[in-house]
Amino acid sequence: MVSFPSFLPRGPPPPRPPRDRSSSSLTSLVPPSPIRGSSTLAYLQDDRRASDTPQRDGLVTIPLTPTSASLMRRAVSRQQHQQRSNGPFVGGEGARRQNEAERDRLQGLMRSDTMASRARSPRLARTSGGGGAEMKARIKVWLMHEGPRVLVFVLWLMLQLGVLAIGVIRYDMSSNFTQARTTFGKTYVLARATALVLHVDVAFLLLPICRSFITLMRRTPMIRKLPLDESVAFHRLVAYSLIFWVIVHVISHLFNSWWLAKTWTNSTAPCLVAALEINGTTGPYLTGWIMVAICLVMAWFATEKRRRKNFERFFYTHHLAIPFFLLWQLHGMFCMIRPDRPPFCSFWQIGLFWLFWLGGGAVYIVERVLREIRSRHRTYISKVIAHPGKTVELQIKKEKTTMRPGQYILLNCPAVSLWQWHPFTLTNAPEEDHLSVHFRVVGDWTAELAKLLSCELDPRDQQSKEVGGEEANLPIVSVLPRIMVDGPFGTASEDVLKYEVAVLVGAGIGVTPFASVLKHIWYRLHAPDGQALRLRKVYFFWICRDYASFEWFQSLLLAIEEQDVGNRIEIHTYLTGRIQTSDAINIVANDVGNVRDAVTQLKAPTHYGRPNWDRVFLSLSDEHPSTSIGCFFCGPKPLASTLHKACVQYSSADREGTRFTFSKERF
């Protein structure tokens, strides 16, 4: 995509200047110059100064190498002419004219003059006194962002304690359990009360992982009341609660086995042996210990670190939930501790696990059956494209499938693994006649799939190329594998169109959900009879380590930029990885004047280094007062935490201020 041909005079390379550790890899190689400009490099160097500091006329702005050889020759010629007339790197009116094209390419949010005025905006100034009114406002803003999650947690905690209290009252005060309380004491009451809490927990365990059920719930008014995007987090909360009460339940029954052995003998050693015999030979204890072992294995491999390191172990061990549930049903059917009065072991007194599990379990089973049927609809790969950065694009045709922008699917390739389903965000728009996904080859499963697709991924490749597919313009050289698609399922990116202003932030391959959203917006804007969009402005940020990654959706961004007459979509690309020395030397040797960025071929320039989110959110607050702005992100956790904190920090509690809402992609 981007090439840097050698056009410098032959000879030894120029001495390498010392690297400034506080700057980006590009700006550290740029020498000072008296030419002033408002380019990307100028923006990065402005970040190190206060917004209201007067700018010097000695700021250099050097673009990437022009893509045309004639442009390069003219650039060198202009530079030599300027050096002969004014000396090397001496600013003048000619230099300013050369820099005008790049200055005009800057997006409105990144112009230095507007940034300075926004930073001085009195409405955004914070009071230094920190009085009660400010504290109250900050608490209100915090509750706006964290309130739903905190409310769910508090309600869950109250439910746990409430059910525990009901169980303690029932088994401690009922006259039907007097003999059991006499034999076992308070540990019997605690064991039975925690068992009741565990039965309530299992009623909620499966509902949050019913993907189709959650997707349907997102289309109801419940999306405004419940944090449905946190459904997987709620599943973890229920699982942690279950593990905690299992531990309390086990400890209580260990004491119960000791008290039961005490009724047989008063000697310590025989009593210990009898307690061990009870734990190893009786039905309730045997099933209980097997359940504890299964529970610990599932929890061990479900931790985030181990799940990311070896997904297969997490996937297969989580299916131990099936024997876990069966053992749970048997665990309560032995009727080892009987009540004082008949009926002693009736159907409605023992083995009540099925009654609590039935609601969530029935929804889960029905959904799984429907998803199995849906995943076997006729599906085939229409096109395979190998992109730079070890990334593969799959275009899939599947019958009876509808989707919304920002949704994801589960992909299965039986030739790789019959049981593994992996989530991938859709990158196509609903208006297109196919499904498309982009995935990076980073693990065993993706590497094997890329091999079956005949993708020979070379890190040195800088161009995308078609490598196969039934609709590809290539001769058939191999048989493509069979794939199955389950979904689509809803995510937070579906809500982009509900806001008047949206900020889309994608890091690397995390740009995929926003590719679908941007395509859909583009189709809606150019539909002759389309409905009016509520969305007035979109700020799109794409952060990549290497410039080859921008090739993935270059044609989409070019089309949006060329045909976005109303300037409703601002594109901001950031390059955070280090550029090689040879490329940087070519950058320094070039002149300004190309109307398009050499990395992305867009009019909007590429920024080098990480975004200054404080300046970005200050500008958004000043540009869109009295507006609710949705910030959507897909990428690594550290950046998600940074954006979340920025949304809380720069949200206003009053109606005249700007309110930010943060949403992150979760699968």
Image: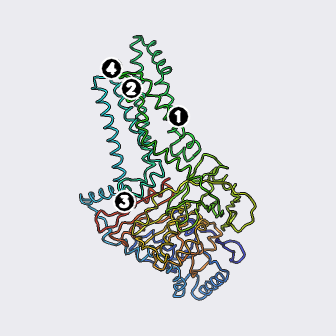
**Residue at x-position 66% and y-position 83%:** 70
| CB contact under 8 Å: marks 4 and 2 | no
Q: Measure the alpha-carbon separation of dots 3 and 4.
A: 58 Å
| CB contact under 8 Å: marks 1 and 3 | no
Q: Measure the alpha-carbon separation of dots 4 and 1.
A: 32 Å
Query: Is residue 364 rendered to the left or right of residue 460?
Result: left
Describe the element under mark 4 as helix, strand or loop. Answer: loop
**Residue at x-position 60% and y-position 45%:** 419
Q: Measure the alpha-carbon separation of dots 2 and 1.
A: 24 Å
Q: Nearer the viewer, mark 2 or mark 1?
A: 2
Pointer 2: what residue?
346
The location of residue 222, given as percent across then percent down, is 37, 55
Could you tell me the amino acid type at mark 1? Pro
On the rendered image, what quadrant is the N terminus found in? bottom right
Pointer 3: what residue?
648
**Residue at x-position 49% and y-position 66%:** 517
Pointer 1: what residue?
323
- Of the pair 215 and 539, the residue shown nearer to us: 215
- Of the pair 394 and 78, the residue shown nearer to us: 394
Describe the element under mark 2 as helix, strand or loop. Answer: loop
- Of the pair 629 and 321, the residue shown nearer to us: 321
Query: Is residue 203 rendered to the left or right of residue 431?
Result: left
Placement of 77 over or under 246, stated as above or below: below
Pointer 4: what residue?
340
The location of residue 57, given as percent across then percent down, is 47, 80
Mark 3 or mark 2: which comes first in sequence?
A: 2
